[in-house]
Image: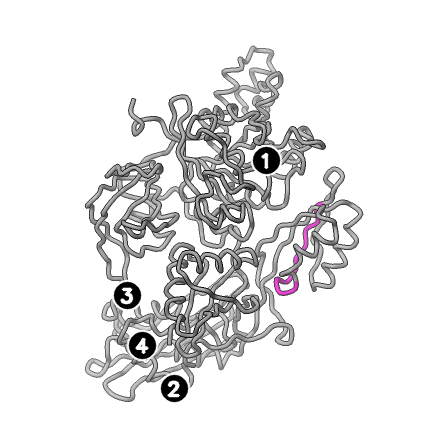
Amino acid sequence: MTAASLPLRNIGIFAHVDAGKTTLSEQMLLRAGAIREAGSVDRGTAHTDSLPVERRRGISVRATCVRLQWKGTAIHLIDTPGHTDFTAEIERSLWALDGAVLVVSAAEGVEPQTELLYDALKRAGIPLLFFLNKCDREGADIPGTLGQIRRRLKASAVPLFDRENLTENVCGEDEALAERYLAGEDVSEKEAEDALRGLTRAGKACPVLAGSALKGEGIEAVLDAVTEYLPPPENADELCGVAFAAEKDRLLGRGVWIRLWGGTLKTRDTVTLPGRMDPLSGEMIPVEQKITQIRDVRGADTGELKAGEIGIVYGLGRIPVGKVIGNGEKLPRSVKPGAIREPLMTVRVLPEKKEEMEALRAACEELSLEDPLLQARYSKATDELQLRVMGAIQLEILQETLETRFGLKAGFDDPTVVYRETIARAGTGFAAYTMPKPCWAVLEFTLEPGERGSGVQYSSVVPVRDIMARYQHQVEQALPLALRQGRLGWEVTDIVITLTGGNHHLIHTHPMDFILATPWAIHDGLRNCGSVLLEPMLEMKLLLPAEYVGKVMSDVAVMRGEVLSTETDGDRVMLTALVPAAESMDYPTRLAAATGGRGGMAARLHSWRECPMELGHTAKRRTTDPLDTAKYILAARSAMSGGVFDMEQE
């Protein structure tokens, strides 16, 4: 049997930081014979940490895919970063997986970040197994950690290391076996294992293994469990894949890591991708790209990528990470960017030399293609370049990446929390773009407050005899541009917008007049409706020694937060609180200092709450104000000559 025809598993390794995830990956590679010597994160020799910055700093920054073979099964293993600043890498890896291994330290137990990772895997419907690591450590508590998993993560966690009670544990999850077992019938260990395989792949149970990655204990059991319990790829006939990572090759240029869920890609195939919007029709103009080379996970030129496989495809141009190839409806799951953790800070990028701004902008835009959550945006009006970031560690890595990869020295100003805004009351917005000729676009909107968390809802009641269908489509396409910065300078959300009136002119209407008029009319409505500032609220989960609970509860009150619940878990307390992001940016550092490193926490966006203006702040406008009509028309007309959405870069 050739390597290409072997049974396949695409799995990811996930863990709370320092739980031993990369060490486990190295030991799996070693035991399978893929490497001769296990690397070390601390020494910068880990085979799954290939970037120079990862080797120097001893941390995983990128999700990395490697291949190994175990007992006749090929395994594509994706090792993900553990630090929360690189959660975006974890998110994108979910696109590529059929199964996962979630590593939990038996010494520290289930940490708050472990819960976030488990929730993300559960929402994505990815079958998984647990590996209890560091079982050799003093203070390791295997029964206690298993109990935490059952209480806080998965009640149907079945320990494979407890062979004596394996049948009983599985019968507790399988009704058919349970009836036989309770009736006194003999249920063999093989029957129990077969039942557990089905339960695991259906997401109804999770096998649990134990060992020590550092000492190489329990590694073969993990490899066996990956091949036995986690599912093989389910392959569709129609072309369907997703770009989940990108890299640069010195000779071939930009390559994207593709997980192909259906169909086949071959070298010299032409792939159709969405392009820019046609200003005449409002539709996206597809762009055709020809594949120049396809490499497998090991870097070999294969010339072909089949359904179920992961490979690197060259020739797809500037396709962003997260872009779907082929029929996206065939994807088994959709992972929304920011689903695990959304970047809630914005930072200004400062070139060392003013003349390097254009090069710095290009570099940040390239990095944004690799990590769309960075959202690099440049304002020509203010000559400012901004990024969305997770935290201080990510900023340090970005600074080093810009210097080592692009040869650019850059700094950052102090990060600012990202706010949003909505409207205070219902109202109307109007714009009549009829001068200077030739132009004609008249629009009237009704704006109403939406429920918190509802986002933007849009509809039209205007007949096509008044505004042609293609112009109405342009209005809808231009709404994100109009709402990107409201009257307070932040993205507008929780709003219901209805196009209620307007008209076009058979002679004077220019193809892009309605795109220009839409922000004008929307901002007129925002001014009439009044603005409300919204601040991000974080749900913080803190795992604390009991003696620090009072101190943390006091901290939460000082941060304008509220304690939602407390739950005793062994000798520690799980405290859940709701806290404004602006007040808690540095709290992980403060918590570590206050508890001597014994307290752990994880946070995720919970909701957006109304914030008094004196406690928040407005953002500088990056583009010309649509209500500064004369200046806006001149700026917009100039920007449109280079592309519809270039207006954001004025």
What range is drawn magenta here?
574-583
Tell me which numbered mark, 3 or 1, is placed earlier along the sequence: 1
Tell me which numbered mark, 3 or 4, is placed earlier along the sequence: 3
In this figure, which residue is indicated by the disc labeled 1?
A: 154
Horizontally, residue 529 falls left or right of residue 545, namely: left
In this figure, which residue is indicated by the disc labeled 3?
A: 277
**Residue in the image at 61% along x and 33% along y:** 155
- Point out residue 218 in the picture as x, y percentages from the top left corner: 56, 25
Residue 144 placement: quadrant: top right
Gap in Å between the C-alphas at discs 3 and 4?
14 Å
In this figure, which residue is indicated by the disc labeled 2?
A: 629
- Point out residue 40 in the picture as x, y percentages from the top left corner: 53, 37
In this figure, which residue is indicated by the disc labeled 4?
A: 639
Amino acid type, callout 3: Met
From this view, report whether residue 251 is shown above or below residue 479. Answer: above
- Point out residue 163 in the picture as x, y percentages from the top left corner: 59, 18
| Helix, strand or loop for disc 3 | loop
Q: Which color scheme did the rendering employ for the protein?
A: one colour
